[in-house]
């Protein structure tokens, strides 16, 4: 088959699929919890049920999971992990995703509103567990996110026969030369490698998911590798292509449309991109040294819940974490230059609350879901790199990354705080552009009044 100018093969789009949902859903065997309370560290209680009953909330749904046509084994899995009602994206996307013949999907919804369940339930619904063949592939931009997605597959698939395998660096059992797991989750480089070496037999793959799809398709980033994976998929039968993200900037939309042709689309309005529960602040610092001093003075507040500090460069993350540790503070740093096993243990420690402050780069800006994170600090604002498409200068802010970074807090109706450090005219202007583009006020906090800061923060977390 010929590739076109963008490197695409023309895929088939419709056809039969063996699906679990062909069997009618029976009533759930497990009774979902009646209320679902979210506790923050400031002892404020938010009732998730209230938000899920508000039609204006992205967590709202008029339906139950039973009404979405899921197999009872998956309903059991959902109730087992405490999901009682779908969110808006789940309610809207699942019927489209599960319909036959399968159709592609480009789905957008705010950070922390439950996109993962939508695509994980689709993969689990489409797998024929009686076949020991790989039938669904899922790609994510980082190993940390791939591991998190896998944990959701395993949890939601607990009452099924699903077998899973990773396609992430240094994770395959030694000597493994054939993967037959039903669902393979990984990062694009390793997935390509395993497919090329025929370790993964893709001849029966029928679902291909890209989480953080705009990032995965960006031609200045992972786009080439992702396309390579797609072009190795079978062309003997249709493969359902599913793209999800909180952001789809204009420069990837056209490519996404070609990547997932004739897709059903669920889109957000620009003014709805950020989550209501996240209050955005900034602090006016004098210079780089002052930024560091302010971060240290914030330490008490950072450790009330958990916090993620985002830096532009790996060496900044290392430098400030080393300085803080030397001064007696407990912080961890995580970035892509660390080796695989170290990365795994750092994120696991943070996830389990053994570390409270994580200093990092954009590597975990997307997708990472740790409910106790109630504060995000943009130590450096995210910037478009100099190859950025929609901007010609490298000093323009990267609004999408900003949305994803602050979205590490305020998950599924929780409250959260983000603080930007600005320290000169450029960073001020960059932040102003972000503020304009998102249409949300970013409130100033005095750098020399810790009490005022604490007051404002407590209020924001109420
Ligand atoms: N229906 C539900 N009921 C209760 N909790 C839910 C439900 N759906 C998702 N959640 C929880 O909400 C949190 C956020 O979900 P998820 O990580 O899928 O968000 P997302 O939309 O993928 O966000 P991001 O854009 O940041 O990747 C998770 O902790 C998840 O377990």
Image: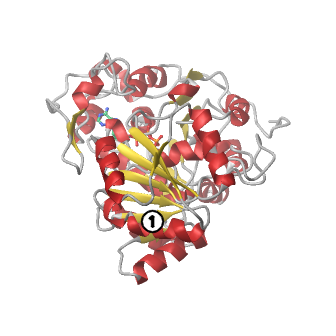
Q: Secondary structure at mark 1?
A: helix
Picture coordinates of residue 190 (x, y %)? 60, 59
Residue for point 74% across, 46% down: 219
Q: Residues within 10 Å of mark 1 (few under 14, many from 20)?
A: some
Q: Is residue 359 above or below residue 12?
A: below
Q: Is residue 261 above or below residue 300?
A: above
Q: Quadrant of ligand 1?
A: top left
Q: Residue furthest front?
A: 448
Q: Is residue 67 visible?
A: yes
Q: Respond yes or no on whether mark 1 lies under 8 Å from ligand 1.
A: no
Asked which colour scheme the image uses, the reply is secondary structure
Q: Nearer the viewer, residue 329 or 82?
A: 329
- Horizontal side of 329 relative to 199 (left or right) equals left
- Which residue is tagged 1? 295
Q: Is residue 46 above or below residue 221?
A: above
Residue for point 54% across, 37% down: 245
Picture coordinates of residue 454 (x, y %)? 32, 53
Q: Is residue 206 visible?
A: no
| Quadrant of the image occupied by residue 13 | top right
Picture coordinates of residue 391 (x, y %)? 77, 43
Number of callouts: 1
- Horizontal side of 261 relative to 174 (left or right) equals right
């Amino acid at each position: 088959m010929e590739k076109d100018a963008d490197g695409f093969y023309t895929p088939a789009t419709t056809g039969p699929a063996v699906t679990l949902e062909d069997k009618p859903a029976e009533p759930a065997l497990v009774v979902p919890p009646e209320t679902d309370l979210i506790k923050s560290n400031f002892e404020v209680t938010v009732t998730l049920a209230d938000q899920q009953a508000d039609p204006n909330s992205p967590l709202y749904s008029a339906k139950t999971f039973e009404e979405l046509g899921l197999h009872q084994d998956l309903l059991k899995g959902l109730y087992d992990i405490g999901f009682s009602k779908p969110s808006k994206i789940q309610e809207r996307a699942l019927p489209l995703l599960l319909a036959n013949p399968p159709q592609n999907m480009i789905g957008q919804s705010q950070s922390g509103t439950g996109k993962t369940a939508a695509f994980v339930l689709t993969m689990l619904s489409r797998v024929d567990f009686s076949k020991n063949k790989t039938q669904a592939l899922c790609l994510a931009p980082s190993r940390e996110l791939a591991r998190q997605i896998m944990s959701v597959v395993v949890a939601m698939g607990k009452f099924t026969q699903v077998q899973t395998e990773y396609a992430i660096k240094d994770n395959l059992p030694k000597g493994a030369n054939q993967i037959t797991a039903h669902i393979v989750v990984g990062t694009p480089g390793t997935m390509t490698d395993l497919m090329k070496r025929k370790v993964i037999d893709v001849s029966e793959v029928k679902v291909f998911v890209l989480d953080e799809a705009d990032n995965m398709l960006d031609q200045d980033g992972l786009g080439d590798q992702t396309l390579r994976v797609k072009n190795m998929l079978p062309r003997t039968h249709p493969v359902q292509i599913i793209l999800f993200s909180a952001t789809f900037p204009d420069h990837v939309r056209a490519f996404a449309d070609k990547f997932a042709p004739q897709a059903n689309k669920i889109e957000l309005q620009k003014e709805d991109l950020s989550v209501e529960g996240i209050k955005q602040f900034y602090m006016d610092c004098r210079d780089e040294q002052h930024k560091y001093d302010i971060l240290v003075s914030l330490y008490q507040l950072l450790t009330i819940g958990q916090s993620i500090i985002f830096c532009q460069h790996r060496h900044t993350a290392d430098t400030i974490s080393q300085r803080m540790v030397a001064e007696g503070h407990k912080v961890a740093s995580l970035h892509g230059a660390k080796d695989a096993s170290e990365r795994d243990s750092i994120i696991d420690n943070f996830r389990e609350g053994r570390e409270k402050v994580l200093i990092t780069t954009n590597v975990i800006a997307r997708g990472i879901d740790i409910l106790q994170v109630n504060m995000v600090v943009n130590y450096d604002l995210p910037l478009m790199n100099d190859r950025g498409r929609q901007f010609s200068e490298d000093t323009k802010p990267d609004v999408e990354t900003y949305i994803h970074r602050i979205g590490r807090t305020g998950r599924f109706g929780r409250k959260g705080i983000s603080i930007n450090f600005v320290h000169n005219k450029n960073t001020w202007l960059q932040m102003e552009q972000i503020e304009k583009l998102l249409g949300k006020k970013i409130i100033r906090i005095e750098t020399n009044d810790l009490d005022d800061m604490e007051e404002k923060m407590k209020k924001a977390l109420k």
